[in-house]
Image (cartoon, helix red, strand yellow):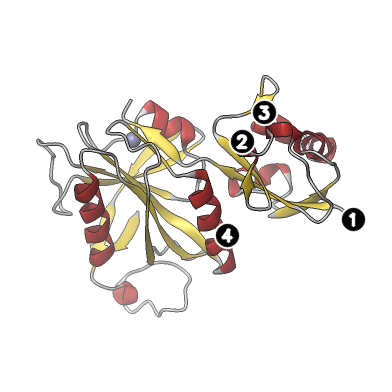
Amino acid sequence: MLVIRRDLLDEIVAHARRDHPDEACGVVAGPEGSDRPERFIPMLNAARSPTFYEFDSGDLFQLYKQMNANDEVPVVIYHSHTATEAYPSRTDISYASEPEAHYVLVSTRDSAETNHTGHEFRSFRIVDGVVTEEEVQVVETYMFAHTGADDVPDLG
Amino acid sequence: MAVTVSIPTILRTHTGGEKAVEAKGSTVAEVIEDLESRHSGLKDRLLKDGKLHRFVNIYVDDEDVRFAGGLEAPVKETSTLTILPAVAGGMR
Ligand SMILES: [Zn+2]
Protein backbone atom coordinates (compact mmCIF):
# COMPACT_ATOMS: atom_id res chain seq x y z
CA MET A 1 0.00 0.00 0.00
CA LEU A 2 1.10 3.53 -0.77
CA VAL A 3 0.36 6.05 1.97
CA ILE A 4 0.83 9.56 0.60
CA ARG A 5 0.08 13.05 1.83
CA ARG A 6 -2.62 14.95 -0.04
CA ASP A 7 -0.31 17.90 -0.79
CA LEU A 8 2.26 15.59 -2.45
CA LEU A 9 -0.43 13.88 -4.51
CA ASP A 10 -1.67 17.32 -5.59
CA GLU A 11 1.88 18.34 -6.62
CA ILE A 12 2.27 15.20 -8.76
CA VAL A 13 -1.08 15.79 -10.49
CA ALA A 14 -0.33 19.50 -11.01
CA HIS A 15 3.02 18.62 -12.61
CA ALA A 16 1.32 16.09 -14.92
CA ARG A 17 -1.27 18.70 -15.97
CA ARG A 18 1.37 21.40 -16.48
CA ASP A 19 3.45 19.25 -18.83
CA HIS A 20 0.51 17.80 -20.73
CA PRO A 21 0.57 16.78 -23.63
CA ASP A 22 4.13 15.66 -22.83
CA GLU A 23 4.67 13.01 -20.19
CA ALA A 24 5.76 14.39 -16.82
CA CYS A 25 8.04 12.51 -14.44
CA GLY A 26 9.65 12.81 -11.03
CA VAL A 27 10.35 11.36 -7.64
CA VAL A 28 9.14 11.75 -4.09
CA ALA A 29 12.09 10.94 -1.87
CA GLY A 30 11.84 9.79 1.71
CA PRO A 31 14.08 8.55 4.51
CA GLU A 32 15.66 5.16 3.79
CA GLY A 33 13.59 2.36 5.32
CA SER A 34 10.62 4.62 6.15
CA ASP A 35 8.47 3.95 3.05
CA ARG A 36 7.25 7.52 3.61
CA PRO A 37 7.26 9.91 0.64
CA GLU A 38 8.30 13.39 1.81
CA ARG A 39 10.36 15.44 -0.63
CA PHE A 40 8.72 16.23 -3.97
CA ILE A 41 11.28 16.41 -6.79
CA PRO A 42 9.82 17.11 -10.24
CA MET A 43 12.25 16.08 -12.98
CA LEU A 44 12.59 17.28 -16.55
CA ASN A 45 11.45 14.81 -19.16
CA ALA A 46 14.59 14.82 -21.31
CA ALA A 47 12.59 13.10 -24.08
CA ARG A 48 9.98 15.94 -24.09
CA SER A 49 7.52 13.50 -25.62
CA PRO A 50 3.83 12.62 -25.29
CA THR A 51 4.72 8.92 -25.47
CA PHE A 52 8.05 8.59 -23.65
CA TYR A 53 9.81 9.91 -20.59
CA GLU A 54 13.38 9.79 -19.44
CA PHE A 55 15.29 11.53 -16.67
CA ASP A 56 18.26 13.42 -18.11
CA SER A 57 21.35 11.38 -17.19
CA GLY A 58 23.09 14.35 -15.54
CA ASP A 59 19.97 15.21 -13.53
CA LEU A 60 19.67 11.55 -12.51
CA PHE A 61 23.24 11.58 -11.20
CA GLN A 62 22.65 14.76 -9.18
CA LEU A 63 19.36 13.38 -7.83
CA TYR A 64 20.98 10.20 -6.51
CA LYS A 65 23.97 12.11 -5.15
CA GLN A 66 21.61 14.36 -3.19
CA MET A 67 19.45 11.47 -1.97
CA ASN A 68 22.50 9.49 -0.85
CA ALA A 69 23.80 12.51 1.06
CA ASN A 70 20.42 12.80 2.82
CA ASP A 71 20.02 9.02 3.43
CA GLU A 72 16.96 9.14 1.21
CA VAL A 73 15.57 6.72 -1.34
CA PRO A 74 13.07 7.25 -4.18
CA VAL A 75 9.95 6.14 -2.30
CA VAL A 76 7.73 7.18 -5.22
CA ILE A 77 8.74 7.29 -8.89
CA TYR A 78 5.95 8.89 -10.88
CA HIS A 79 5.11 9.66 -14.48
CA SER A 80 2.06 10.54 -16.50
CA HIS A 81 0.34 8.97 -19.44
CA THR A 82 -1.26 11.63 -21.57
CA ALA A 83 -3.47 9.53 -23.86
CA THR A 84 -3.70 6.12 -22.20
CA GLU A 85 -4.71 4.63 -18.85
CA ALA A 86 -2.59 4.99 -15.71
CA TYR A 87 -1.12 1.50 -16.02
CA PRO A 88 2.56 0.58 -16.63
CA SER A 89 3.36 -0.09 -20.28
CA ARG A 90 5.75 -2.78 -21.48
CA THR A 91 8.47 -0.15 -21.76
CA ASP A 92 7.73 1.13 -18.24
CA ILE A 93 8.10 -2.43 -16.93
CA SER A 94 11.32 -3.15 -18.79
CA TYR A 95 12.96 -0.04 -17.33
CA ALA A 96 11.62 -0.42 -13.78
CA SER A 97 14.63 -1.01 -11.56
CA GLU A 98 13.71 0.09 -8.05
CA PRO A 99 11.97 -2.95 -6.54
CA GLU A 100 11.24 -1.04 -3.34
CA ALA A 101 9.70 2.01 -5.01
CA HIS A 102 6.04 2.76 -5.53
CA TYR A 103 5.60 3.35 -9.24
CA VAL A 104 2.86 5.97 -9.50
CA LEU A 105 1.04 6.65 -12.76
CA VAL A 106 -1.28 9.54 -13.44
CA SER A 107 -3.38 9.78 -16.58
CA THR A 108 -4.15 13.21 -18.02
CA ARG A 109 -6.19 11.80 -20.93
CA ASP A 110 -9.59 13.33 -21.74
CA SER A 111 -11.56 10.34 -20.48
CA ALA A 112 -9.50 9.86 -17.31
CA GLU A 113 -11.12 7.40 -14.90
CA THR A 114 -11.14 9.27 -11.62
CA ASN A 115 -10.87 7.13 -8.49
CA HIS A 116 -11.05 7.89 -4.75
CA THR A 117 -7.97 10.14 -5.06
CA GLY A 118 -9.98 12.55 -7.20
CA HIS A 119 -7.81 11.75 -10.23
CA GLU A 120 -6.72 8.79 -12.35
CA PHE A 121 -3.86 8.19 -9.93
CA ARG A 122 -2.68 4.61 -9.35
CA SER A 123 0.29 2.95 -7.70
CA PHE A 124 2.18 -0.24 -8.55
CA ARG A 125 5.08 -2.39 -7.45
CA ILE A 126 7.20 -3.59 -10.34
CA VAL A 127 9.55 -6.42 -9.35
CA ASP A 128 11.34 -8.68 -11.85
CA GLY A 129 8.96 -7.62 -14.58
CA VAL A 130 5.84 -8.42 -12.54
CA VAL A 131 3.35 -5.59 -11.95
CA THR A 132 1.21 -5.58 -8.82
CA GLU A 133 -1.27 -2.78 -8.27
CA GLU A 134 -1.56 -1.57 -4.69
CA GLU A 135 -4.01 0.46 -2.67
CA VAL A 136 -3.41 4.22 -2.41
CA GLN A 137 -4.25 5.80 0.92
CA VAL A 138 -4.35 9.60 0.92
CA VAL A 139 -3.70 11.27 4.28
CA GLU A 140 -3.47 14.85 5.48
CA THR A 141 -0.45 14.08 7.66
CA TYR A 142 1.70 11.00 8.37
CA MET A 143 1.19 11.61 12.10
CA PHE A 144 -1.86 9.35 12.18
CA ALA A 145 -0.89 6.91 9.44
CA HIS A 146 0.90 3.61 9.84
CA THR A 147 3.99 4.24 7.79
CA GLY A 148 6.32 1.77 9.46
CA ALA A 149 9.42 2.42 11.50
CA ASP A 150 10.17 6.11 11.63
CA ASP A 151 10.81 8.96 13.99
CA VAL A 152 7.25 10.23 13.78
CA PRO A 153 4.97 8.49 16.28
CA ASP A 154 2.24 6.26 14.90
CA LEU A 155 -0.75 7.60 16.80
CA GLY A 156 -3.47 6.23 14.59
CA MET B 1 44.67 2.39 -4.52
CA ALA B 2 41.47 1.26 -6.07
CA VAL B 3 38.48 2.73 -7.82
CA THR B 4 35.33 2.99 -5.72
CA VAL B 5 32.26 1.65 -7.51
CA SER B 6 28.82 2.71 -6.31
CA ILE B 7 26.28 -0.07 -6.80
CA PRO B 8 22.53 0.62 -7.25
CA THR B 9 19.94 -1.24 -5.14
CA ILE B 10 18.91 -3.57 -7.94
CA LEU B 11 22.47 -4.89 -8.43
CA ARG B 12 23.35 -5.32 -4.76
CA THR B 13 22.36 -8.99 -4.95
CA HIS B 14 25.69 -9.38 -6.78
CA THR B 15 27.70 -7.61 -4.08
CA GLY B 16 26.25 -9.24 -0.98
CA GLY B 17 24.21 -6.12 -0.28
CA GLU B 18 27.19 -3.75 -0.40
CA LYS B 19 26.41 -0.22 -1.65
CA ALA B 20 29.96 0.35 -2.80
CA VAL B 21 32.82 -1.97 -3.71
CA GLU B 22 36.40 -1.48 -4.85
CA ALA B 23 37.83 -2.46 -8.20
CA LYS B 24 40.90 -2.02 -10.37
CA GLY B 25 41.26 -0.81 -13.92
CA SER B 26 42.28 2.15 -16.02
CA THR B 27 39.18 2.17 -18.23
CA VAL B 28 35.50 1.52 -17.56
CA ALA B 29 35.77 -1.79 -19.46
CA GLU B 30 38.67 -2.94 -17.28
CA VAL B 31 36.84 -1.99 -14.10
CA ILE B 32 33.82 -4.03 -15.25
CA GLU B 33 36.05 -7.07 -15.97
CA ASP B 34 37.63 -6.75 -12.53
CA LEU B 35 34.21 -6.44 -10.88
CA GLU B 36 32.99 -9.54 -12.70
CA SER B 37 35.92 -11.57 -11.36
CA ARG B 38 34.64 -11.07 -7.80
CA HIS B 39 30.96 -10.29 -8.31
CA SER B 40 29.86 -12.83 -10.86
CA GLY B 41 26.90 -11.86 -13.00
CA LEU B 42 27.40 -8.10 -12.77
CA LYS B 43 28.87 -7.81 -16.26
CA ASP B 44 25.74 -9.27 -17.88
CA ARG B 45 23.61 -6.70 -16.09
CA LEU B 46 25.73 -3.83 -17.44
CA LEU B 47 26.65 -4.88 -20.94
CA LYS B 48 24.77 -6.31 -23.87
CA ASP B 49 26.67 -7.51 -26.96
CA GLY B 50 29.78 -5.81 -25.62
CA LYS B 51 28.06 -2.43 -25.30
CA LEU B 52 26.66 -0.56 -22.35
CA HIS B 53 23.07 -1.71 -21.81
CA ARG B 54 20.56 0.99 -22.71
CA PHE B 55 18.89 0.64 -19.29
CA VAL B 56 22.13 1.46 -17.48
CA ASN B 57 24.10 4.67 -16.93
CA ILE B 58 27.70 4.62 -15.76
CA TYR B 59 29.43 7.75 -14.54
CA VAL B 60 33.12 8.37 -13.94
CA ASP B 61 33.00 10.92 -11.16
CA ASP B 62 30.11 13.09 -12.36
CA GLU B 63 30.46 12.42 -16.09
CA ASP B 64 28.18 10.04 -18.01
CA VAL B 65 30.58 7.75 -19.90
CA ARG B 66 28.28 7.85 -22.95
CA PHE B 67 29.63 11.37 -23.44
CA ALA B 68 33.20 10.58 -22.40
CA GLY B 69 34.47 7.72 -24.53
CA GLY B 70 32.06 4.96 -23.57
CA LEU B 71 33.60 1.78 -22.17
CA GLU B 72 37.06 3.10 -23.08
CA ALA B 73 36.56 6.15 -20.87
CA PRO B 74 39.64 6.54 -18.64
CA VAL B 75 39.35 5.87 -14.92
CA LYS B 76 41.80 7.27 -12.39
CA GLU B 77 42.69 5.58 -9.12
CA THR B 78 40.97 8.40 -7.30
CA SER B 79 37.80 8.12 -9.40
CA THR B 80 34.41 7.01 -8.26
CA LEU B 81 32.45 4.98 -10.75
CA THR B 82 28.69 5.25 -10.23
CA ILE B 83 26.25 2.80 -11.76
CA LEU B 84 22.63 3.96 -11.99
CA PRO B 85 19.71 2.40 -13.77
CA ALA B 86 18.07 4.79 -16.24
CA VAL B 87 14.68 6.09 -15.15
CA ALA B 88 12.53 6.00 -18.23
CA GLY B 89 9.42 4.57 -19.78
CA GLY B 90 6.87 5.06 -22.46
CA MET B 91 3.25 4.78 -23.40
CA ARG B 92 3.67 1.44 -25.23
ZN1 LIG C 1 4.48 4.94 -18.96
For disc 1, the marked residue is B1
What kind of residue is marked 4?
A: Lys
Q: Quadrant of ligand 1?
A: top left
Residue at screen point 29% across, 40% down: A23
Instruction: Point out the frontmost of discs 3 and 2.
Output: 2
Q: Earlier in the sequence, mark 1 or mark 3?
A: 1
Residue A75, disc: none
What kind of residue is marked 3?
A: Leu
Q: CA distance from mark 1 to mark 3?
A: 25 Å
Question: Helix, strand, or loop for circle 2?
Answer: helix
Instruction: Point out the frontmost of discs 1 and 3.
Output: 1
Instruction: Point out the frontmost of discs 2 and 4.
Output: 2
Residue at screen point 76% across, 53% down: B79
Residue B66, disc: 2
**Badges 2 and 4: C-beta atoms under 8 Å apart?**
no
Q: Is residue A95 above or below residue A10?
A: above
Q: CA distance from mark 3 to mark 2?
A: 13 Å
Asked if badge 2 and badge 1 are on a common chain, one would say yes
Q: Neighbour class for label 3 at 10 Å: few (<14), some, many (≥20)?
A: some
Q: CA distance from mark 1 to mark 4?
A: 23 Å
Asked if badge 1 and badge 4 are on a common chain, one would say no
For disc 3, the marked residue is B47
Residue at screen point 81% across, 49% down: B76
Of all chains, the one bearing label 3 is B
Q: Earlier in the sequence, mark 3 or mark 2?
A: 3
What kind of residue is marked 2?
A: Arg
Tell me where residue A81 appears, x and y as whole percent: 26, 37
User: What is the residue that sits farthest to the left in this orientation?
Assistant: A111
Q: Is residue A25 above or below residue A138?
A: above
Residue A65, disc: 4
